[in-house]
Image (spheres, rainbow, N blue to C red):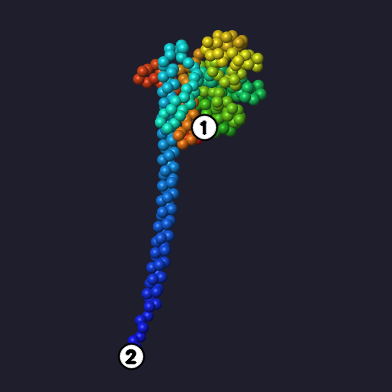
Amino acid sequence: MRRPRARSGGHRGTDGFIVVAVLWILGALATLVSIYAVYVTNTAAGLDVNDDRLQAEASMSAALELTAHQLAAAEAKSRPTSGSFTFAIGRSTVAADFRSEAARIDLNEAPKALLAGLFAGLGAKTPDAEYYADRIVGWRTEAPATGQNEEAAMYRTAGISHAPRQGPFADVAELWLVLGLPPILVERALPHVTVFSGRAEINILDAQPEVLAALPGMTPDRLYAILAQRGAGPANADLVLGLLGPAKAGATVEGSKTTRVTARIRFGNGRQVGAEAVILTLDDAAEPFRVLSWHDDFDGAR
């Protein structure tokens, strides 16, 4: 008598289920591996960026230290108002320049005529340039104790939500908030102004041509002669002053106690970062200088 054959269909169904489950597990593992690979890549990139930032901060700090050392090594009357140097630190090479803040127009100290001259030189018509200068003076001038505050009233009439500070500019970026100033002129003016100089005059040995041209009484011929002669350095200061004529009233060959330091930092991997800071020189061995402002490319566009 033949025995009936056992059915094997149940085993085949179970085997198929196991295969599908294994494929699902393998797919899930592959997904996890991909996610982990992306995580590792992003983490490595983040660590590299953080390492570059730390290296940039260390390089800029070294540039400030070296600048302060050059300034402190000389007597106050003979301190350099500008200079440049290069050095290597760690995996980076640094090219640094420093220049007295007196080379810029101080928004809190400059007379109206100098401010108007700057805007006129940057492309504004004379009446408009004088109006812009008035608004800057109005922004920094203390509000009257009694009577109507005409400057603040102008902002309300123009529908502007903020009022003028009516106190010293805290940052040059406040120019964007001054009533009536066209954005294109603000953008052009920012490289030539400061709030750290503390002087009404500008240093004609270090100032950019746009700043020299803003001096009341300056003419194209005088400007050309000054630019041609000042290359001889501080030893030529008296000659340069003599070329100013009526523009001499707003000029000086002295620096200020504040200095702007700019640095270009090149890393070993080829990346470059720019940094800029303003320092206040102190006659104190414990604290030779103090940082007033700091900005670098990691912060984005200013």
Q: As displayed, is residue 125 above or below residue 228?
A: below
Q: Where is the N terminus found, in terms of image quarters? A: bottom left
Q: Nearer the viewer, residue 85 or 274?
A: 85
The structure residue drawn at horizontal position 50% and vertical position 13%, both measured from the top left corner, is 254
The structure residue drawn at horizontal position 37% and vertical position 21%, both measured from the top left corner, is 287
Q: Is residue 71 left or right of residue 232?
A: left
Q: Quadrant of residue 193?
A: top right
For marks 1 and 2, the one nearer the N-term is 2
Where does label 2 land, which residue? 1
Where residue 215 appears, as percent x and y from the top left, is 60, 16
Q: Quadrant of residue 124?
A: top right
Mark 1 neighbour class, 10 Å CA radius: few under 14, some 14 to 19, many 20 or more: few
Inspect the image, locate mark 2, and give the three-letter code of the amino acid beneath it.
Met
Mark 2 neighbour class, 10 Å CA radius: few under 14, some 14 to 19, many 20 or more: few
Q: Nearer the viewer, mark 1 or mark 2?
A: 2
Q: Secondary structure at mark 1?
A: loop
Q: Nearer the viewer, residue 80 or 210?
A: 80
Confirm whether residue 146 shows in the render: no
Where does label 1 land, which residue? 302
